[in-house]
Amino acid sequence: MTIKGVSIFIVEIPRIEDTLKRFDKRFIEKIFWPEELNSSGSKHLAGRFAGKAAVKKLIGNANWRDIEIISFRDKPKVKLWGKARVIASKKEINSIKLSISHERKQALAVAVGVGK
């Protein structure tokens, strides 16, 4: 197992709340899968956004909806689709480990690309 890359992203939770108020469904539909919206509250949505952004930085120029963050046994799990999957494969990234943390006003995510 080899680490192919590491990325970190931090976001202000109030910034996500303001964006949701201004753009409503347009923002949500552009960024998130319906399954990603099952978590409650803007804190968790900001965490998933930070997770997606960290993965985007890790693999490169992918579409937001080509990155899906799901909960698996109370841990975030990354699923890649389309262009994101192709880019990760070219970079020999077989899996992405993700950690998400929340504070009162911030959400942070760290993505680690793992290969053989």
Image (spheres, helix red, strand yellow):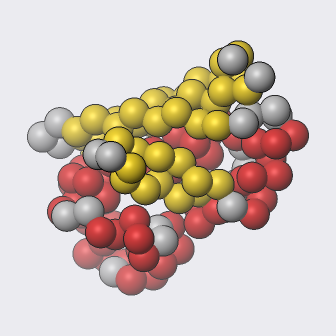
Residue 76 seen from this side: yes
Which picture quadrant has residue 70? bottom left
Q: Position of residue 10 (x, y in %)?
A: 38, 37
> Given the current orientation, which residue lies at the most extreme right position?
90
Q: Is residue 43 above or below residue 66?
A: above
| Quadrant including the N terminus | top right
User: Residue 18, located in which quarter of the rendered image?
Assistant: bottom left
- Front residue of 88/52: it is 88
Q: In screen coordinates, is 101 left or right of 85?
A: left
- Image location of residue 63, percent across then percent down: 66, 61
The x, y position of residue 95, in whole percent, is 64, 37
Task: Judge left or right: residue 46 versus residue 3.
Answer: left
Q: Name above or below for residue 35 compared with residue 46.
A: below
Query: 20 left or right of 110?
Result: left
Camera-side residue of 116 and 80: 116
Vertical placement of 1 versus 18: above or below? above
> Residue at 70% across / 16% down in the picture?
2
Q: Residue at 82% x, 42% y: name it.
A: 89
